[in-house]
Amino acid sequence: MEKYRGLSPAQFFHRNKEIAGFSNPARALYQTVRELVENSLDATETHGILPDISVEISLDPSNQDKVTVKVADNGIGIPIHEIPNVFGRVFYGSKYVVRQTRGVFGLGVKMAVLYAQMTTAQPIYVKSAPRNSEFIGEYLLYIDVDKNIPHIVKMRIKKKDNPKIHGTVVRLTLEGSWLQAKKRIEEYIRRTALIAPYATIKYKTPDEELIFRRVSKKLPEPPRIGRYHPKGVDVEILKELIRSLNDHSITLQDFLVKSFEGVGEKIASEFIVWAGFDPSLKVKELRLSDLEALASKMRTFDKWRRPRPVTLSPIGEELLKDGVKNILKPSFVKAVTRPPSSYGGHPFIVEVAVAYGGEIPPQDQPMVLRFANKMPLLYDEGVDVSRKVVNEIDWSVYKVKFPAPLAVITHVCSTKIPFKGVGKEAIADVPELEHELEIAIREAARRLRSYITRMERLHEIQRKEATIRRYMPEVVSSLAEILSLDAALLESKLEEILKKELGKKGVEQHVVS
Amino acid sequence: MEKYRGLSPAQFFHRNKEIAGFSNPARALYQTVRELVENSLDATETHGILPDISVEISLDPSNQDKVTVKVADNGIGIPIHEIPNVFGRVFYGSKYVVRQTRGVFGLGVKMAVLYAQMTTAQPIYVKSAPRNSEFIGEYLLYIDVDKNIPHIVKMRIKKKDNPKIHGTVVRLTLEGSWLQAKKRIEEYIRRTALIAPYATIKYKTPDEELIFRRVSKKLPEPPRIGRYHPKGVDVEILKELIRSLNDHSITLQDFLVKSFEGVGEKIASEFIVWAGFDPSLKVKELRLSDLEALASKMRTFDKWRRPRPVTLSPIGEELLKDGVKNILKPSFVKAVTRPPSSYGGHPFIVEVAVAYGGEIPPQDQPMVLRFANKMPLLYDEGVDVSRKVVNEIDWSVYKVKFPAPLAVITHVCSTKIPFKGVGKEAIADVPELEHELEIAIREAARRLRSYITRMERLHEIQRKEATIRRYMPEVVSSLAEILSLDAALLESKLEEILKKELGKKGVEQHVVS
C-alpha cells in the first residue's frame, strides 16, 4: 500500500532546492548574494532612491566553508509586521504583480534562508527601518519547514534616532564554497555596477575590498504596476480578475476596458462583436465554458493595441553608456535603446551597447555581456538569443578584424522575460526579440564602423607624418642648399604646411561617441 | 507602499508553469502524456504487475488545438478517498520517500490538471479501482487554485463487478499543439517500450495506432523504500527524523544505526568517537547547534558503508537486450549492467547497451538513447554526460567506421539523478557517474569489436569465395584438359575443398550476442 502525504511549500523547496539555483555550495553562495543584492536594488531604484548597497562576505575562521553574507541598503524598508512572513514563509511577498522586477519566482530570499538553516542551522538576521515609519524592527528568525511559517527566535522594535533613516540589513550564514564562487560573484557585482551606474556598491570579501561609485545621479523612470494584456490571459486569470470585482452588474464591455491593458471602448466593442458575445453580459454571471471561450478568443484576436511599456524600466542610452565606460573603459561606445515592442501579451524593450578598444582585451569573438531586467546573466551564454544574434552578424562588414577588443552589451526588459528553462540564465530566441536585438546591434555597429574608419585614417596619417618627419631634415638641408635658403626658416614653413594638411584629414585620438 | 500577499502553491505553479515543463502548447502536451504514462508505469511494475497501458490522444473536431489525452493502466489504483488530493492538491502524493521513482518533483499530474483547466476550463476525469478494494471511484474535479484544494464537480463510488479488477483511467483536455508535439510523443512512447520491454503499450492518435507488445514477462526487482545515507543529510532532515521518533530515550548510537542506510554498530561507534560526541547522548535533547555539528560531521566522515542499491531497480542486461532488439532491430547488441556505485550519499547503477547494424540507420556519429530511472530523456542531449562520454571514445579502436549504424543506450538509475538544472532532461557529469558510464560502454564496445572483426572476416571469405567461383569454370576446364580428368568430378571435388576451407574460417551471418 502506498502512503500518501502532503508537503508544505517549504518542505517541497527544501527537497528541490535546485529549482531556485541552490544546487551546490558554490552555486548556493552565488545565488544568496544575488538574491539579496537584487532585493536591495528593487527596494531602492524602483522607489526613486539612489541605491547605496554594501555587500560583505566573511568566512568563519574555524571553518572556511561557513560563509556569512551581509547585505545592507538604503531602500524603502519592509513594514515591520511583514518581516517574518517576507523572510520566513515560502510563497509570500510583494512581487506578485504585473511589473518588471528582478526576481522571477519570488522565491529567492526564502531559499537562501532555507539553505542557510539546513546547512548551518543558523537563523537569518534582519534589521529594517521602513520609510515613513518611526520604528526599526530587528528579527532573528528561521522557517518552520514543516508548517511553512516563520519561527521567530528573537525580535526587537525600537524607535529611530533619526526619523529620516530607512533601509534594510540582512545577514545569514550558510555552507558555501567561497573559493569556487568568488570569481563569479565578483563578476556579478561588476556587471551589476555596469547596468546600474547610478548605484554605489561597496563590496568587501576575505580577499579584497572594492567600491563601485555611482557615475550618475540620474535614475531611470521606475516601472509602474500594470494590468494584464488580453493576449496573455488564461481561464484562471479571468476567474481571479472577475472574483476581485465588487460590482456585480459590471458588463463584459466594461470589464475588458477596465481590467486590461490596451483595450479602449472601441476595440472592446469590436472584439465583442467579433467573438460573438452579448456586450451587456454581466461578467459575474459567466459560466466556466464561457470563460474558456472568452480566454481563447482574447488570445487570438489580433486588433488589441500593443501593450504599453509603462510597466518597464529600461536604463536608457545615456546611463548605459556611462555604465559601460565606467566598467569596461573602452575607447569607443555606442548605446541604443529601441522603442517598445511585444511578444504574446508581454511588452519588452531591447537596449544594446557596442564597445570597442581601450581596456577591453582582444578576443577571437565578440565578448557578450547579457542583462535581463537589469540582472546580469552569467550562466548558459551559449544558448542565449544574444549570443546567437551576435554570432550571426558578419562583423567584417563593420570593419572589425578578430581578434578584436569588441564587447556587445544586451539588456532585455519585460514583465515576462522569455527565459529558457527555469534557470533564468538564458533568454529564448523569440522571433520578435531576436529581430529587435539585431536591429539595435546593427545600429550601434554602424557607428563602430565609422569610428574604426576614422581611426584607420588617423593611423594612416600618423604613419605618413612619421615618414615625412624621418626624411624632413635631409629634405630641408638639400632644399636649403639648392635654393640657398635658411634651413631653420624652411623647416618651420614646411612644419606649418605639414600640420595644416594633417589637421584637415585628422581626428581627435579618442572618440567616445 | 508595497503590497504584500501570500500565494497558494497552486497559484505559484500556475504562474510558473515552465518549472514543470509546461512552457508552450507543444511541450505541455508532451509533458502531460509523459506524466500520465510514468504514473501508470510506477503504479504497475513497481508493485509487481506486468504493465498494460493504453494511451489515447484525440482532437476536438471543431478545434484542433483542444487535445484530449486518456491514459489507462492495470496498476494498483489509488485509494478512493485519496483521489481528490492526489489530483487536486499541489504538493500531495505518494512519491515523497527515498526510492527510485520516475517522477522527480511529484508535481507532474497536478501541473497537467492546472494546465488543462487554465487553457480549456475542463476538469480532469479520474476513475480508479484500487487493488484490495471492492469499490471503484469516479471523479470529475479541478484545482481550486486560490486555496490549493480539489474542487469536486462530480463523484460516484460503485461496487466492482469483478473484485480482481484494478487500475486507473485518467482523461483530460488541454490546449496543445498535436502537430508540433506528435513526433516527440511517438519517440517518447517508443523509447518507453524499449526500456520497459515487459510492458504492453497501446498508442492511438489521430494519425496512427501502434501496439508495443511485451517481449518478456520478467519484471525487474522493484525498488524498496530506503533510508537516508549519512552523507546526504542536512539539519532539516535530522530535525525531521528526530521528530518522528517516539522513544525519548533513544541515544545517538541507536539513532544512527536505526535511522540511516549503511551504518552498523561498529561504524556508528567509530563515528561518534571521531566526531567527539557522547554516545549516550539522547537525540531528542540535541540543540540546534549540536544538530548542525552532527550533520556537518556526518557529511564529512568517510568510513560509512556505500549506500546499498535496494532502493534501485535497474532493468538488467537480459531485459535491456530484449528491449533494444525489439525496438531498434539491430544485428548486434551487447548489454552491460554495472555493479552499484554511489556519489554523495546517493546510490546509482549504470546500464548500457551498444547496438549495431540491422535497421539502425548509419549516421556520422553514434546515436545516443538516454534513460534515467527508466524515463526516456529526449531534450538537451548535447549537454548530457552520456553524449560526452560517447563522444570522447575513439570508436575506431572498436573498428567502427563512420557513418556507422551504431546506437549507444544508457540507463542511469538512482534515488537522486544528478539532473542538470531542473528540466530533468540532461544528466550532469558527476565524475563517479562518468567513470561508470565509460567502463560500461567500453566493455560493450569490446564485444562490438569482436563482432565487427568476425563480420569483416566473413565478408573477406565471401569475397574470396565469389572470386574463386568466378574463375572456377575456367580452372576446372583447363585442369580437366591438362590432367585428362572428368570435368564434373573435378568440379565437385574442388567445391568440396572450397566449402571445407570456408567453413573453417566462417561464422554464422547473424550474431546477436
Image (cartoon, coloured by chain):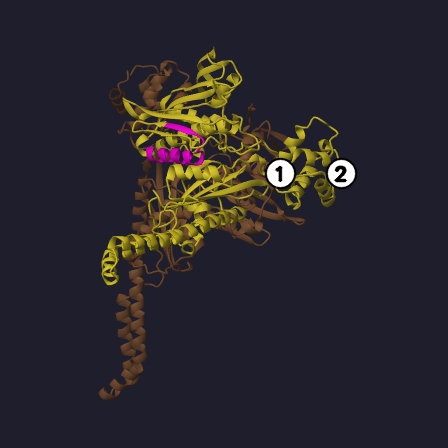
Chain colours: A yellow, B brown
Q: How far apart are marks 1 and 2 (CA)?
A: 20 Å
SS for callout 1: loop
Magenta stretch: give its range: A182-202
For disc 1, the chain is A
Give residue B221's position: percent from left, percent from top. 40, 39
Q: How many labels does the image show?
A: 2
- The numbered dot on residue A229 is 1
The kind of residue tagged 1 is His
Question: Which one is in front, A504 or B273?
Answer: A504
Residues at circles 1 and 2 in contact by the CB criterion of under 8 Å = no
Question: Which one is in front, B508 or A436?
Answer: A436
The kind of residue tagged 2 is Pro
Give the residue drawn at x 57%, y 49%: B178
| Residue B157 quadrant | top right
Give the residue drawn at x 29%, y 84%: B474
Q: How busy is the neighbourhood of tag 1: few (under 14 within 10 Å), some, or many (20 plus)? A: many
Q: Is residue A3 left or right of residue A265?
A: left
Give residue A244's position: percent from left, percent from top. 66, 28
Q: How busy is the neighbourhood of tag 2: few (under 14 within 10 Å), some, or many (20 plus)? A: some
Residue A200 is a magenta residue: yes
Q: From the image, state whether disc 1 or disc 2 is nearer to you.
A: 1
Q: Is residue A223 left or right of residue A447?
A: right
**Majority SS type along the magenta span:** helix
| Residue B69 quadrant | top right
Q: In which quarter of the image is the N terminus of chain B?
A: top right
